[in-house]
Structures are given as structure tokens and as C-alpha cells.
Amino acid sequence: MKAVVYERYGSPDVLSLEEVPRPVPGDDEVLVRVHATTVNRSDCGVRSAKPFIVRFFSGLFTPKQKILGSEFSGVVESIGATVTQFAVGDRVFGVNANKLGAHAEYLCMSQDAPLAAMPTKMTFEEAAAVCDGVVLALMYMKQANVEPGQRILIYGASGSIGTAAVQLAKHFGAEVTAVCDTKNVEIVRALGADKVVDYTTHDYVTNDGSYDVILDAVGKDSFRHCKGALREDGIFASSDLGFLWQNPVLALVTKVVGSKKVIFPIPTYTKAEVLYLKDLIDQGKYKAVIDRCYPLEQVVEATRYVETEQKTGNVVLTVFSEEG
């Protein structure tokens, strides 16, 4: 099968399309013929090994997992002897954040992994572009206890996590102020944000203590900068470690010091979350946001675009076409 392989850490140029052996499913696994996948911020971080701490998980000197890619959609090609949840021919979508491997024509996953039947009205490209952002955004929503009537500010509302957070926060009944750049204002407003702030022309942080939750969905702000905009029992969350890894430290410190808290939950991915997302989509309460689609062969170009940090929503790689 064809797969995008990288043998060393570095720039997007370390990625190359190669022929590798097709994986064989174990007894409790399904083999998925991948139709679409994504290039996301996590892929770029693992490939470049930045921050350095990434190497402690992915390989200190060289990558242990040679194929990137976590989100995907496709069709079940074959199943293991004990698989009961899926059948050959099922259209599925999911996320394989711990083992990766989706930048390839085929992928094996346990039937109990974050994998589910595709939403009925979605294309393969749309289904590939939802899981990671939603799982991460949902993690912040749950730990921050977002409830009806609360006010939440989402900085970086046009990215993968941000577009998911806007939709989920509205689903939970919160009043959403979304922050993005000029070109994405109307897109974010269409996702349901109550107020959209263009950070290129307006200051989005004021010291009026008006927000219950502030989510920095792109990891470019800080608790110090946003603290004044939080209510006395408000919560700040970031998708990045922060300068000198301050956010995990602040999450520990603010547990016991001060009324305003920082949360930094450890990402977990479960089947229950993917099934929850499928239900939202089937009810028409969530939609994918796709910036660009590239063929698998153009993974280097797609990755370079993601690293401009200008993408809206998600960048998709098409592996097999609908007809293929």
C-alpha cells in the first residue's frame, strides 16, 4: 500500500510517499481502507519534534511510528475473527491519536477504539475532518463545566479546535464570543457565535470580569493576559503548554491559590466521544469546517499550509476518491 513515511524529525520535506506492507488486522481489529484523513497541528508537532518533550513519546532520536495521521474516514475492508461491532463494507470514521497511521491507504484499529459508523449525510472528507477537534474541544468544555447561560470567549475560533468549541459551547447553551481574523468572521458567525471579534481591529480582552470561561484554542494567549476578563470564579484553558510550560504549572498552582483557575486536561480519546459526535451530526447540530483538500501525494504542500497557521477549520488529504 501507499503511505506517507518519515524516517527522521524535521521540516515537511522529510515526508515521502512510499510503498509499505499493508497491515493485517488482529482478532479484535478491523482493516479500514482510508478514503480521507487530515493534516493537523499535532501531526506537525510530532513530525518536527517540537516542543522537545514530544520525543519522549514518539522516539528520542528517530520516530518510532513512521506514519502520521490521526483522523480518518473510510470503508471496512476486512475484520478479525472476534469482531462483532463492524462488518465488511461499513463506512466508518474515527481518530487514532495514540498510534497514528492514517496517512496511508489502509489502517488497522480495534473495534473498541474511537471508531464508529459514519454519519449518514457526510462525505468522507467531512467525516475525516471532525473527530480530533471535537474530542479536544469537548474535553475543555467538560472540565470547565460549561453550562447554559455562561459566557465563554473562544480565541482562535476559526481553527480545528476553535470551530468545534464554538459549536459545542452553543450546544451546551453558553453565550459565545468568538475571536478570529477578518477573513473568518462570517464563517465563525455562521457556526452560531453570539458575538464575533476581529482581533486584527479590536482588542478582545477587557478587564471587566465578564467571562466564565476563556478558551485559547490555538495556544497563543496567556492566563496573565486574560485574567482580568474572567469572573472571580472563572476558568482559563489553553491548547498549548505555554511559555516555559506555564499552563500545566498554573493548573496545579491555581487549584490552591486564587479564585480564578487554569485547567490543562490530558487528552483522551474514546469510542463514546466519537459516538456522541456522530449523534450530534446526525441531528444536524454539528458540521465540519474544511479549508482545503489535497491528494495524499501533496502531503508536503498540505503540511506547509497548515504550518502557516492560517488555516480555517481543517485541511484534508484525499486518499481514495468516492468512486475509487
Image (tube, rainbow, N blue to C red):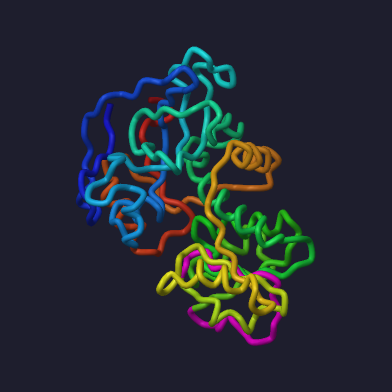
- Please report the residue visible at 52 percent of the width from the left and 70 percent of the height from the top: 180
Q: What secondary structure prevails in the magenta region?
A: loop
Percent of width and height locating residue 4: 27, 39
Compared across the picture, whether 178 is left or right of 19 comes to right
Residue range (magenta): 200-219
Compared across the picture, whether 171 is left or right of 115 comes to right
**Where the C terminus falls, by quadrant?**
top left
Q: Nearer the viewer, residue 31 or 241?
A: 241
Compared across the picture, whether 119 is left or right of 245 comes to right
Tally of marks: 0
Residue that lies at the very extreme toward the top in this rendered image: 81
**Where the N terminus falls, by quadrant?**
top left
Q: Is residue 294 magenta?
A: no
1 in relation to 238, above or below = above
306 in relation to 89, above or below = below
- Please report the residue visible at 58 percent of the width from the left and 17 percent of the height from the top: 84
Compared across the picture, whether 317 is left or right of 188 comes to left
Q: Image quarter for residue 271?
A: top right
Percent of width and height locating residue 72: 45, 38
Percent of width and height locating residue 225: 54, 82
Q: Nearer the viewer, residue 167 or 123?
A: 167
Q: Is residue 48 visible?
A: yes
Q: Is residue 201 magenta?
A: yes
- Please report the residue visible at 68 percent of the width from the left and 38 percent of the height from the top: 279
Q: Is residue 185 visible?
A: no
217 in relation to 125, above or below = below
- Please report the residue visible at 52 percent of the width from the left and 77 percent of the height from the top: 199
